[in-house]
Amino acid sequence: MLHSDSEETLSPRARLASLGLVLPAVSPPKGEYVPAVLSGHLVFVAGQVPMTDGELTTTGRLGDEVSIERGRELSRQCALAALTAVDSVVGLDRVTRVLTVTGYVASARGFLDQEKVVEGADELFFEVFGAAGGHARSVVGVADLPLGSPVEIETLFEVDR
């Protein structure tokens, strides 16, 4: 996706606002971990599942109960939750680069379009960070995810000090 020079000068928060998006509240962990950890110039974000008001937004597997388009929307929701987690530990405007995205997709037998699902997250990172949203990516199809989630997105961000 190409961005104009004026878009390159917008802060991540301004880009979110231009997309009509607001960071959600940090979802409380469902175990003994924290949503994000800062180590040096890196913020490691725990896997995010699509939550709305503390509850899983949708359950099911791609290729059965969940369509690719719905999976993309849920992946995007997970990416937005990852941004919230980063914001909670360092502030979103300190992000200098999205480094990696790992997408886990609960898949029905024979479902082979996992990458199309995770593209929802990829696109959000490009929309919010421009060229700095370019990242390495892995996509994994799995039988089940926690809470019955269709998708989970794990991320790593570089930040300034």
Image: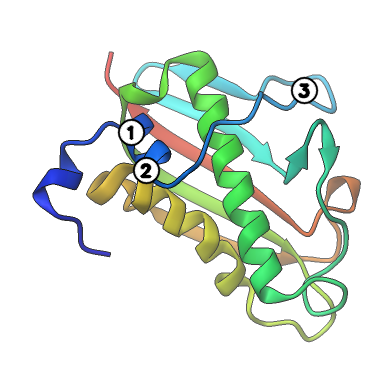
- From mark 1 to mark 3, how far is it between C-alphas? 26 Å
Task: Give percent across and percent down for residue 128.
Answer: 36, 44
Say which quarter of the image contains residue 97: top left
Residue 149: assigned label: none
Residue at the image position 83 percent from the left and 68 percent from the top: 61
- Mark 1 or mark 3: which is in front? 1
Above or below, comparing residue 22 to residue 36 in the picture: below
**Taking 144 as reference, is 113 left or right?**
left
**Taking 148 as reference, is 98 left or right?**
left
| Kind of residue indicated by mark 2 | Ser
Above or below, comparing residue 161 to residue 145 in the picture: above
Q: 10 Å neighbourhood of mark 2: few (<14), some, or many (≥20)?
A: few
Residue at the image position 67 percent from the left and 75 percent from the top: 68
Task: Give percent across and percent down for residue 161.
Answer: 28, 13
Say which quarter of the image contains residue 82: top right
Residue 28: assigned label: 3
Judged from the image, the secondary structure of the residue bearing numbered disc 1 is: helix
Looking at the image, do the residues carrying marks 2 and 1 touch, with CB atoms under 8 Å apart?
yes
- Per the image, the residue denoted by label 1 is 14
Q: Which of 120 and 33 is in front in this view?
A: 120
- Which residue lies most toward the left here? 5
- From mark 2 to mark 3, how far is it between C-alphas? 27 Å
- Per the image, the residue denoted by label 2 is 18
